[in-house]
Image (tube, rainbow, N blue to C red):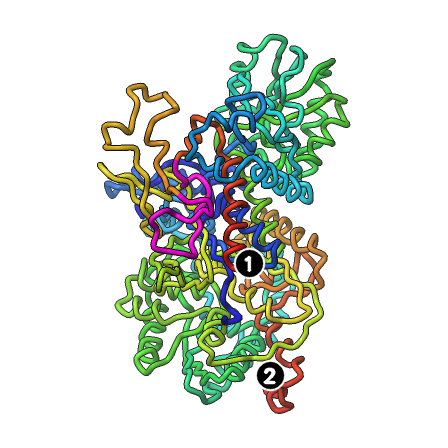
Amino acid sequence: MNRADYDVVVIGGGISGLMASLHLVQQGLKTALISRGDPICCLSTGCIDVYAGTRKPLKGLKGLPKEHPYNIVGEGGIKDALEFFIDIMDKTGLPYEGTTKKNRQILTPVGTYKTTCLVPGTMSHASPENDEYIHVISFKGIKDFYPSYITSKLKNTGYSVFDAHAVSTMAIASKFEEEAFLQEFISWLQDLFIPHGRVAIPAVLGISNPLDVIEKIKAAIDREVFEIPTLPPSIPGIRLYKTLKSTLLKKGGHLYWGRPISSVESQGGQVEAVTIQTSGRPTRVHGRSFILATGSFVSGGIYATRDSVKEMVFDLPVYVPGPRDDWFNPDFFDTGHAIETAGILTDQSFKAIESDYDNLFVCGSILAYCQIMKNHCGHGLAISTGVAAAEKCEEYLS
Amino acid sequence: MKFEHCVRCTICVENCPIFKMNPEYPGPKQAGPDAQRFRLDGEATIDEWVRLCSQCKRCEIACPYGVDVSEIILRAQLNYSREHSSPFASHLFANAYYVGILCSSFAPIVNRVVKWPVTQGVMNILGISTHLPFPEYRFLTLGRSRKRKGRGDKKVVFFYGCHLNFNRPDIGRKIRDLLVSLGCRVEMPPQTCCGLPALGNGDIEIARRFASKNAATLAEYIDKGYDVVYACTSCGLTLTHDYPGILELPEGKKIAENTYNVHEYILNLIEEGYADPEFGPVEKTIAYHIPCHLRALGIGYPASRLFEMIPGLECRILDDNCCGLSGSYGFKKKNRDTAVKLGKIAASAINETGAESFVSDCGACRMQLTEFSNMQALDPSEILVESMINSDSSSAAKKRSLL
């Protein structure tokens, strides 16, 4: 083996690809991560949904179809993977809270509660607590955040509006990185004299060190403070992605960012290299094994034509739920559309069924039968299949 | 890809350094794909804010749907500049190459005069920010250095770019000697500015004039079996992306296909088995500030792969921050505040690593971040040279040639 080659090349920079890569670098394997852009997780709430159908997330797995990727990982595997995730995050400025034993709920911008499993520390006080008073803070002109949605829906709530002289969540979050702005905000907050209960603020409390910001606010007003995830740009989603990415870099992972894969080289049932479509001349990335984590339709891992579904990098066979007429339910807002089951079927070692490649493993939402919208299992599935596929890949290499 | 592919997910906005700092700039989504639908029917461009984009390309790299966000904005900038007059500073920066020739010829005088308060006052009046010490010019430029060195089967044209040529020819010579020590025959033919400063300052005609000159020279060498190697990542992006792209040069495709980042090239030499350099220990912790345009090249971070082969070297990669200078962008007074704020953020990320010094491939990043981090800035190749000098097996003669 050439000293410039990789042990593993992971394709797809979302949560699943990042977690797979993190597991591999931890095992001392030389790992490259290729992504054609920033992942969809940047648009997410940053919370880790495992399974929202039951109070205890792992209890619900029995009700899932046997082909569901969770059933390949198994209960123990899911627990281990999520613990690995919590461990990683604990060593950063963005620790996560919660256990796989019990789901929890967090307040949303429309005054409802969303069921999830692990939450960033900034949302640790976002669960409903005996109708305790919640004071919502909003920002003048902030896009897509209307505190009256919350106050009209939930009893015992009120709100105030601060003028941050910026309207997008990203721009406000950047301002919270400046101490002077934070102090101005805190003194405004102190003048509100919020007498009891908790304070809820849209998730804009800084980008890199939100817990420090919360700590300072909490100390000044002596109230618990938590963030409410917003519509994109979603700062908790960006924090999660950036934290995982920089941890990977820190541990020695290599990144190829921003360009799609243009071709695949294979020989005798082995993927040998992929080429990235860089300006002018393609860049060849050579590896001993490969992990595919390019995501489902939204992320562009699979693509639907009128009558078929195509996997975009290796042209793997894709499971499709019957002819197009069967893909959709009559009600658009249903979450159980059959097409949500489309994806790659794998064996117990996360190798695609009927695939030509022996050294290719598949993980994340590109897997068949995920039905993420229906099961609310997005990041949990990404993490557990990412780590599990990486383990199988590691076994293969040894 | 076209603006129609934009699904308005705002990931580009999340990555825009200017949008975070300057409320006047509406961000890449609006400046790019959103506004593009109103630019279709040849109407005059009225949005002056389009000039606030620094062309760092972070939006384009981040876009998961492959929309050429920054290219859409660049074209709008060029249209705007065609229809409106540009400030004096923009004309000056577009012609930075000629400024470089003039300043390096009178280097000892120029380097002193730019420090005078009166000169700085005049520069401020002309719209030039003086928050950074102006880069010092050198008389013995690469253009005035030895044109040909080494013999070997690998024939290389070194496109060194204006910064190394006029300001840091010492680094340029190190890179030349590094390639020679790996068995390359290195040529440094006469060359001009790559054209990027002119593009960034709204003058595509000047850009094309510079680029055509280089293209003719480089294509001639490529036909003779040479590979083109660049060290400046912004020059590299212009050669590989803009020559065949927006500048529409007939030789563009050929140049793009045969042009390599210097560390990518060295890695290839190692992968092919052509070179097998022995890297000696460098007991150091360095922070590696990845320039935006290295990210934009999409080739990964090849220098960091070479660093892994150096015993004792700890490298912390930082690729989330733009240094804020973006070539001439931060030297314009109207962009000064944005540039300073971004520079401080990027510098504090470097400081937080606890490294002894930092490396970056881009001369502008090095200038800006040395100022704000108070740390020594190195080119990645300088680390490689240091390591090769430290290796046991390298002969005294070889060491001398690298020193």
Compared with B270, A243 (above or below) is above
Compared with B147, A394 (above or below) is above
Disc 1 with disc 2 on a shared chain: yes
Mark 1 nearby-residue class (10 Å; few <14, some 14–19, many ≥20): many
Q: Residue type at mark 1?
A: Ile
Residue B244, given in percent of the width and then of the height, sits at 31, 63
Residue B156, given in percent of the width and then of the height, sits at 42, 80
User: Viewed as shown, does residue A253 lie left or right of B284?
Assistant: left
Which residue: 57% across, 50% down? A22
Q: Residue type at mark 2?
A: Leu
Is residue A46 or residue A293 the one in the foreground?
A293
Q: Is residue A359 magenta-colored? A: yes
> Which residue matches tag 1?
B290
Quadrant in which the C terminus of chain B is drawn: bottom right
Q: Earlier in the sequence, mark 1 or mark 2?
A: 1
Give the CA separation, mark 1 to mark 2: 25 Å
Residues rendered magenta in the picture? A346-368
> Which residue matches tag 2?
B402
Residue B146, given in percent of the width and then of the height, sits at 49, 86
Mark 2 nearby-residue class (10 Å; few <14, some 14–19, many ≥20): some
Which residue: 40% across, 61% down? B198
